[in-house]
Amino acid sequence: MDISATSTSVKTDSLDSPIYCSDDPVVREGQEAWGRLSSNMTWDDWKHVGKAHLVGRQKAMTEANVNRPIGRRYNKAFGAWLREFGFENLNIGDRARLFEVMGHFAEIDAWLATLTTNERVRLNHPTAILRKWKGSTVVPDREGAPKPSPYAQLKNAHAVALEENHRLRRSVEASPGNAWKPTDTASAIADAMLATLSPEKAEATAKEILKKVKERKASGT
């Protein structure tokens, strides 16, 4: 079975090649949808991929004996699942946003139903859907710039928590423990760090990196 990856979401030099076609109907539908996304992106297929990832995440948590999708054992188990069923090349940022969308699946699906057919057709990727949906929750401020409603603030806080929990880069690299490679872009490295660190730790790390860069420049090393 040839399961391909979407050109906008994966490395172009490495297409997914699943070891197994899953016996789980949800995962199998996700594999088939992932193959179709290489030539035609639709929200329906992304939903199948997202549902398959929820199954994989739960299996990895069970195997790692953890209650949350974090930690080295979970990362190792989830990375193995991604490789086994051919989802490993989904971009880390797209995967995190797909998990976020699936976390609000009922709300987002109901919101999509209120849009016109043309609007729904254009929203065929988790990133676009999440951005548009979040924008729809902003309450205009008569005195100035729009401010998010309390409900939107709560959802944004939940999104931050999801980003912290989803450490999803392990399986893409040669070593499961590496979140990025020296050849990656600065933006990709930053995304990988943000996927594994809390906002506070990420900010502290960034400051420490700048400090050490200045020290190196000063010492000429």
Image (spheres, rainbow, N blue to C red):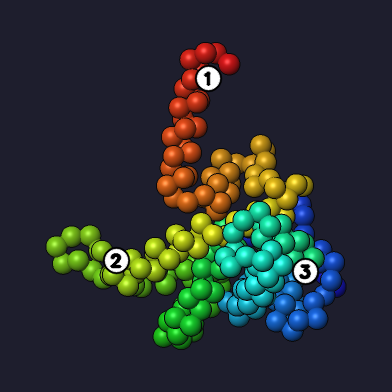
Q: Is residue 118 among what the camera can see?
A: no
Nearer-the-camera pick, 141 or 105: 105
Could you tell me which residue is drawn at 50 percent across and 63 percent down? Answer: 162
For the residues labelled 3 and 2, say whether their Cβ atoms are less than 8 Å apart: no
- Give the side of residue 197 with respect to residue 175, left or right: left
- Going by the numbered disc 2, the residue's amino acid type is Pro
Q: Helix, strand or loop at disc 3?
A: helix
- Which residue position holds label 1? 216
Q: Residue furthest front?
A: 65
Q: How many marks?
A: 3
The residue depicted at 68 percent of the width and 70 percent of the height is 62
Q: Secondary structure at mark 2?
A: strand
x%, y% of residue 139? 26, 71
| Image coords of residue 180 (percent x, y) | 65, 44
Quadrant in which the N terminus is drawn: bottom right
Any mark on residue 85, and which? 3
Mark 3 belongs to which amino acid? Phe
Q: From mark 1 to mark 2, how far is it between C-alphas?
A: 42 Å
Q: CA distance from mark 3 to mark 2?
A: 39 Å
Q: Which disc, if any, is residue 148?
A: 2
Instruction: Answer left or right for 137 relative to 71.
Output: left
| Sequence order check, earlier mark of 1 and 2 | 2
Quadrant of the drawing holding the C terminus: top right
Q: Position of residue 33 (x, y in %)?
A: 70, 76
